[in-house]
Image (cartoon, grey):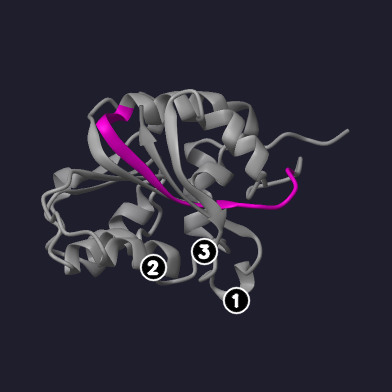
Amino acid sequence: MKKTIKLDKLYWEAKYEQQKTGWDIGYISTPIKEYIDQLKDKTLKILIPGGGNSYEAEYLLNSDFKNVNVLDIAAQPLKNLQKRSPNFSKNQLIQQDFFEHSKTYDLIIEQTFFCALDPVLREKYANKMFDLLNPKGKLIGVLFDFELTNEGPPFGGSLIEYIQLFYAKFEIKILEKCYNSIKPRKGKELFFIFEKK
């Protein structure tokens, strides 16, 4: 019988302590970078949940976005980000369980957080994202496009599953194969923009 892994704070802290962070590419992923590059409003209130080392947040800060918030259940990745970006406001680095967070945002960036959650939490994730967004707020990012596996993280998913999961509460602006994935993820990622209904 397969032993279930409890994907809790201790699990993620251990991953960072042991430097077993295979999902961490060491820089911002191209699809998200190109999305950020076309944003004009630097005052957007932005959240990166399950942010990890959050090269996205560092890139946003270096691009003059002032209201960038990173949330992670583990302390270590937030410390890593603070070390790389000492100007990052400590009160914008939030160590908390995503499902307990309650502020609202204009933009939420998804980068390997959804696929790290136990798949039984996917509907709860979609509902929580809806709650955390301001009216007409956007959830954007990349989702994996490979068969859902029992072993993870990462847990896979599919275009059809994502449509079923999000269509009731979000207008699906874009949900398509990434043309600009990094080489190891080529053909395995979907870029998306969902707007809160």
Residues under numbered marks 2 and 1 in contact, where contact means CB atoms less than 8 Å apart: no
Q: Earlier along the polypeptide chain: callout 2 or callout 3? A: 3
Residue at x-position 44% and y-position 64%: 31
Q: Residue type at mark 3?
A: Gln
- Circle 3 Cα neighbour tier, 10 Å, few/some/many (<14 / 14–19 / ≥20): few
How far apart marks 3 and 1 lie (CA) works out to: 22 Å
Residue that label 3 marks? 19
- Between 143 and 48, the one lying in front of the other is 143
Of the 4 image quadrants, the one containing the C terminus is: top left
**Mark 1, secondary structure of its residue:** helix
Residue at x-position 31% and y-position 53%: 78
Q: Earlier along the polypeptide chain: callout 2 or callout 1? A: 2
Residue 182 position (above or below residue 113): below
Measured from the top left, where is residue 75 in percent x and y? 35, 47
Instruction: Name the side, left or right, on which 87 lies relative to 7.
Output: left
Residue that label 2 marks? 28
Q: Earlier along the polypeptide chain: callout 3 or callout 1? A: 3
Residues under numbered marks 3 and 1 in contact, where contact means CB atoms less than 8 Å apart: no
How far apart marks 2 and 3 lie (CA) works out to: 18 Å
